[in-house]
Each structure stands twice: as structure tokens, then as C-alpha cells.
């Protein structure tokens, strides 16, 4: 009954959170009872067209879900569930997208820190504006009594397929292999075995303090070893989750210590001729240094966030709780998603 | 347009009557599917997309109580009238008979 699952999943996505499972259980029981009755009557399993007929008679997922919403004053049925989907799209897609764009623009402005703060404000204001426009648009649609023909003319077999949720304890081999290669390259570079080609006449000053050399190398090698084990035994155990948690906490502590020593790099460019010396304005050099240091600080922030997320995931694994991906899909209304076992 | 207007009016007319029918049927405990079949047996067709939200609304209003139980190896939600629902049904039935009587005279 994949079609029934897809139908129920489409409804679940549009239902008020907290009531989803209860409503779906009840609706599923009714639809299954209808199928059983029909099969008993015909003396054979139902074909796809017959299953579709039952679902079509129940109604378009948008209409069915809409009937479970509280009556709305401004935006009524069947627009309300559509409005909620559009709102989610604005807040979960447009807002982060605008934040990223504004941040990139801010980094290249004359005063990145001030521009960064302003950009957050701009992104939030733009989102509020979009929510307003969206609300007005739906109120107009409601008032004009626009008929949504797709609610009558729909095909259950065209409903979206069920999302596949990865087995929570499985570790993709590609992920382990990629991590191992990346860490190996990093460790070689960090240990000075593998060197990037030097830029002529450019010298980096103020390297990261030497005290960080061994902690970074030990953490990188430990994670490399863990990736290697995960490559051959691709599933999480509590012990391995605990080991990675220790690495994560070590990395987070190191990121914090590293952030305190910022800025990390300075530049010195040798002028070989008097003409070149005249071209090297100290302000330009300072600007390049500022961009490099700021980019590295952002990269460190990103890495810290990613390790924080991993820490949370590892704690959940140790406590035998479902991974965040599954929780997120449940939150978004895909609780009935199939497991890829 | 005439058909659409008729359809809207018909739905409005049915909506109120359905609530009364559902409350009356739930004097005895039933789950959604059997309730739907019972209503259909009396000539009142109601689709599941309309019935279940209605049941929930009536439960929120305190007129019904519900309970999940397993029957025939399936979990089912059984509904029945609450004491408040019984009282409301009596009042609504009296109202219905009065309206029906008046309408009979008018029509």
C-alpha cells in the first residue's frame, strides 16, 4: 500500500504539528478498513486504479489537512494550508539564503563588522516584508474566491514518493573515506611534510602559536584512525560514538583557544624594484591581511559549529536516541518516512 | 454558477444536520469507520475528510470523549457522547423538531 502511505504522508506534512500522528493513525485505520472491505467484496487485492479511487474520494491532501486546521478569520480553506507551506518556505529557505548573500556582501565592504550586523537586520526586515506580502496575497485570493482546480483534478499516483531516511546507526563508507583522505592531507601539511607552493616575494608572518602543533596533530590522527575503523566497520557503536565525542570536545576546546590568539596571519611583500615599492600602499596590505584573517575566523566559526552539531549527534547516539536528521524529518512532517535498511 | 450556488447552500444545510446525526449516533460508542457506515446506512453520506475533523472539533468542545483501543488487531479510536454532549443533543433535537415543524408548514 505504498500509494496509501504516500497519500497519508502528503497529508501529514500539512497538518498541525503535535496532532500529526494521532490524525494519521485514525485516517489510516479508516482507509485501510475501506480497502479491506472492498477487497473482501471483490475477493482479490485492489489494483492501483481502485486504490486511487478510494483516495480520490477521500479528497486532495490539501483539503483533508485543511479541515483539521482551526477556522481562520483572514485566510480560510483551502488556502490556509498553502499559506503555511509558503510561510515555511520564506522562513526556512529565503531567510537563510538572504543571510548568506548579505554576509558575503558585508565581508567585502569597508567596515565588515558593522556591515555584518546591518546585514542581519536587513535580512530579518526583508523576511518580515515578504511575510506581509504573502499574507496580503493570500487574503486577496481568499476574497476573490479563486477556485483551485487542481484540488479536484489530481492523481494520487503523482503524489511525492516517501523520503528515504538512512539507517541511524549506519556510517556511509564514502563519508569515512573522504574524511580519512582529507585528514591525511591536512596532517601531512600540518606536519610540514607536504608544502603548498610558495608565492614569490610574499612572506607570512605571525604563524599560529607553536603550542598548537601537537594537539592539532594528535586530534587529526585520532580522527583519521576512527575514520579508518568506520570504513571497515560502517556502523556506530556506543564506544565509537564516545570516542568521537572525546575528539569533538577536544577540537572545540582547541578552537576556543585558537580564537583567543586571533589575528593569526600577517603579510610581508618584498619589493624587488623601486617602482614596485611605490605601488605597495600599507593600507592595501592591511586590507589583504584583514580579509585573510576574517575569512579564517569565519572558517573557524563554521568548523566550530559543525563540531558542535557532531557533539550533539554523538551524545544522542550514546543515549540511543534517533539522529537529528530523523528528528528534523519528523518535525517537518515526514515521520512516516521509510527506513533504508 | 447556479449549480455552484446550489452546492454551497446544500453543503451549508447539511453541515448543521450532520452534527446532529453524529451526536445522535454516538449515544452508543463507535469508531470512525463504523460511524460512517451507520450514517451511510441512514442515507447520510459523509466522507472521512469531513467526519474526522468534525469529531475532533466536537471532542474539543467537550461534547464527545474518545479512547484508543485495539480491536481485531487494529488500533481504533472510539468515540461516545459525553454527559455535556448528551445534554446538548437533547437541546438540539428539540430545536430541530421545532424548526422542522415550522418548515413543514412553510414548505
Image: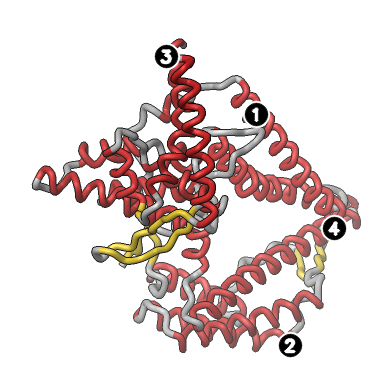
Q: Secondary structure at mark 2?
A: helix
Q: Position of residue A70 (x, y in %)?
A: 58, 44
Q: Residue at point 49% right, 40% down?
A: A67
Q: Nearer the viewer, residue A328 or A222?
A: A328
Query: Which sits earlier in the primary sequence, circle 1 or circle 4?
Result: 1
Residue under mark 3: which chain is it in? B
Q: Chain of mark 2?
A: A
The residue carrying mark 3 is B3
Q: Circle 4 sits on which residue? A: A285
Picture layout, residue A340 above or below residue A248: above
Q: Are tags 3 and 1 found on a single chain?
A: no
Categorize mark 2 by other alpha carbons within 10 Å: few (<14), some (14-19), many (20+).
Answer: few
Q: Secondary structure at mark 1?
A: helix
The Cα atoms of the two marked residues, 3 and 1, are separated by 25 Å
Q: CA distance from mark 4 to mark 3?
A: 77 Å
- Label 2, label 1: how far apart the Cα atoms are: 62 Å
**Which of B44/A123 is in front?**
B44
**Alpha-carbon span between mark 2 and mark 4:** 28 Å
Q: Is residue A166 left or right of residue A100?
A: left
Q: Separation of disc 2 and disc 3 at Cα?
A: 83 Å
Amino acid at each position: 500500500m505504498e500509494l496509501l502511505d504516500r497519500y497519508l504522508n502528503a497529508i501529514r506534512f500539512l497538518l498541525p504539528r503535535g496532532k500529526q500522528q494521532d490524525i494519521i493513525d485514525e485516517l489510516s485505520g479508516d482507509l485501510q478498513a475501506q480497502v479491506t472491505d472492498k477487497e473482501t467484496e471483490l475477493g482479490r487485492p485492489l489494483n492501483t486504479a481502485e486504490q486511487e479511487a478510494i483516495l480520490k474520494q477521500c479528497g486532495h491532501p490539501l483539503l483533508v489537512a485543511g479541515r483539521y486546521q482551526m477556522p481562520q478569520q483572514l485566510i480560510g480553506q483551502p488556502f490556509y494550508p498553502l499559506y503555511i507551506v509558503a510561510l515555511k518556505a520564506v522562513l526556512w529557505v529565503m531567510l537563510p539564503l538572504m543571510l548568506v548573500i548579505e554576509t558575503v556582501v558585508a565581508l567585502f565592504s569597508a567596515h565588515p563588522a558593522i556591515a555584518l550586523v546591518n546585514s542581519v537586520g536587513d535580512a530579518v526586515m526583508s523576511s518580515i516584508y515578504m511575510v506581509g506580502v504573502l499574507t496580503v496575497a493570500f487574503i486577496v485570493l481568499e476574497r476573490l474566491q479563486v477556485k483551485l482546480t487542481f484540488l479536484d483534478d489530481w492523481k494520487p499516483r503523482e503524489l511525492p514518493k516517501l523520503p528515504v531516511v538512512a539507517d541511524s546507526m549506519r556510517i556511509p563508507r564514502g563519508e569515512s573515506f573522504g574524511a580519512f583522505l582529507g585528514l591525511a592531507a591536512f596532517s601531512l601539511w600540518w606536519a610540514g611534510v607536504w608544502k603548498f607552493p610558495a608565492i614569490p616575494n610574499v612572506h607570512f608572518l605571525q604563524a599560529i602559536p607553536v603550542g598548537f602543533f601537537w594537539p592539532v596533530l594528535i586530534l587529526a590522527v585520532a580522527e583519521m584512525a576512527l575514520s579508518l575503523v568506520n570504513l571497515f566497520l560502517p556502523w556506530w557503536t556506543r564506544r565509537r560514538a564516545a570516542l568521537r565525542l572525546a575528539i569533538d570536545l577536544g577540537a572545540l576546546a582547541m578552537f576556543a583557544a585558537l580564537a583567543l590568539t586571533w589575528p593569526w596571519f600577517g603579510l610581508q611583500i618584498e619589493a624587488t624594484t623601486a617602482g614596485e615599492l611605490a605601488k605597495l600602499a600599507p593600507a592595501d596590505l592591511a586590507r589583504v591581511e584583514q580579509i585573510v584573517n576574517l575569512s579564517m575566523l569565519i572558517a573557524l566559526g563554521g568548523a566550530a559549529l559543525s563540531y558542535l552539531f557532531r557533539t550533539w549527534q554523538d551524545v544522542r547516539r550514546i543515549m540511543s536516541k534517533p539522529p537529528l536528521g530523523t528528528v528534523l524529518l519528523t518535525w517537518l512532517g515526514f515521520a512516516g518516512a521509510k527506513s533504508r535498511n | 454558477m447556479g449549480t455552484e450556488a446550489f452546492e454551497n447552500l446544500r453543503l451549508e444545510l447539511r453541515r448543521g444536520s450532520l452534527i446532529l446525526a453524529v451526536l445522535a449516533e454516538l449515544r452508543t460508542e463507535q469508531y470512525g469507520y463504523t460511524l460512517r457506515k451507520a450514517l451511510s446506512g441512514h442515507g447520510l453520506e459523509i466522507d472521512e475528510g469531513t467526519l474526522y475533523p468534525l469529531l475532533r472539533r466536537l471532542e474539543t468542545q467537550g461534547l464527545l470523549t474518545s479512547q484508543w483501543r485495539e480491536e481485531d488487531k487494529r488500533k481504533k479510536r472510539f468515540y461516545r457522547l459525553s454527559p455535556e454532549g448528551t445534554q446538548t443533543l437533547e437541546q438540539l433535537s428539540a430545536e430541530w423538531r421545532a424548526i422542522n415543524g415550522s418548515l413543514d408548514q412553510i414548505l
